[in-house]
Image (spheres, grey):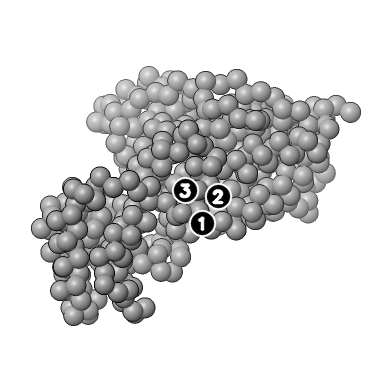
Amino acid sequence: METSHARLVALEVICSVVLDKRSLSSVVYQQDDSPLTKSLVFGTIRFYHQLNDIVTDLLNHSLDKEDLDVHCLMLLGAYQILYSKVAIHASIYETVNVLNTLDKARAKGLVNAILRQIDRNQEQLKHQVHYSHPTWLVKKIKQNYPDNFEQIFTQNNTQAPMTIRIHPKYTLAEYQQELAECGINAETVSVAPQALVLEKPASVYDLPNFESGSCYVQDASAQLSSPLLNPQNTDLILDACSAPGGKTTHLCELAPSAKIIALDSDLDRLERVEQNAQRFNINNIKIIQGNAQQQDWWDGQLFDKILLDAPCSATGVIRRHPDIKLLRKPKDITNLVALQKDILENLWSMLKPGGTLLYATCSILKAENEFQIAEFLHSHSNAKEIKIDLDWGIKTVVGKQQLPAHDFDGFYYAKLKKSVE
């Protein structure tokens, strides 16, 4: 595949995020999903805010609406010059050549001049302090974490490692050896007993026995949820907001005779729960389409345990989904906090006295996490916190918060017990 074509496909995806506000996960790479194309897309989106400021400062005037794709092309070129391993001459030449396909050869002189200026300024630009996050999010993260915001921004702008959860039918050492025989190096994570972090990302089809259920791609932070809930074979468990099924299948691994309800409102995503259950040969899951803030799907039987992986801002997984920085807006946080509160209220009424609810988000914003749970505890006399005794995360008012780190996505957990009245 020609490198100029890779850039054309990358540009189409970048424009769909920047101009059409589509998420990266919904985008189909037309004709070319090569590592080069994807690295160009993710890199440009990851550093969008910095690149946009650089290009905008160099332009004498903003481009017309019909030429915003040319603006995005300059961001793509700037990313290659400042952050990629692509040779500078190729970065500029191949990027400028994309204009031929766009039928905008008239812009070649402008794009070439801007990219060459960025090349001349690159040492200065590389030493600029720029967090490459939207202003509102920079302010909120600094406010929430005055001592940790540098770490958060750095990790958010770094490619996340690929982490897998090994099925208990293997020991970690056994599967680590099988990976090594395939040329894949991996390290253990002390706090997550089934986790291996791969030295380099790999295709799942290169992982030994993947299709017969040897492992599941899942960050180490997310792997903590099922052990924290401590499922037992006699339990009736609700996995609310369960798709695509990572935590559901983990619960089944730990308690293969438990009865587990996998609830989600998205029918398409529930199909992935079904596919994952089939791959792991699991038959103790009942899959239900329904809204977690309603009860029309519920048969009235109280649950022993509830896992609520609540809808959230996903600000803890920006390194995996850099488009969050472009798509998420401040009003979304307010709406999500209200939704989380509604779901908590609803599911709490479905929990047995003496039962346990584990609240989880992949957010780092306190409004969605410790403040949300502190308010819930304050307004529910029958709710008590169970302290999470893990060498993981940082101390919070209630629950535990992990900030983005090399081996861990940003994640929050709070464990609540319903008193026997």
Horizontal and vertical percent position of residue 114: 20, 65
- Does the residue at mark 1 contact the one at mark 2 (Cβ under 8 Å)? yes
Q: Considering only order in the chain, which callout, 1 or 3, is on the residue closer to the N terminus?
A: 3
Residue at the image point whose x is 56% and y is 56% from the top? 330
Horizontal and vertical percent position of residue 389: 60, 20
Task: Please name the amino acid that badge 2 sits on.
Answer: Ser
Task: Please name the amino acid that badge 3 sits on.
Answer: Val
Kindly identify which numbered label has been placed on residue 138: 3
- Does the residue at mark 3 contact the one at mark 1 (Cβ under 8 Å)? no
Kindly identify which numbered label has been placed on residue 328: 1
Report the front residue among 149 and 318: 149
Q: Considering only order in the chain, which callout, 2 or 1, is on the residue closer to the N terminus?
A: 2
Quarter of the image for the N terminus: give it. Answer: bottom left
Residue at the image point whose x is 60% and y is 52% from the top? 333
| Vertical placement of residue 147 versus 9, above or below | above
Q: CA distance from mark 2 to mark 3?
A: 14 Å
Disc nearest the viewer among 3 and 1: 3
Instruction: Write down the residue under mark 2.
Output: 313
- Give the quarter of the image for residue 201: top left
> Please, what secondary structure does the residue beneath circle 1 have?
loop
Quarter of the image for the C terminus: give it. Answer: top right
Q: Is residue 32 visible?
A: no
Report the front residue among 164 and 78: 78
Q: Is residue 348 visible?
A: yes
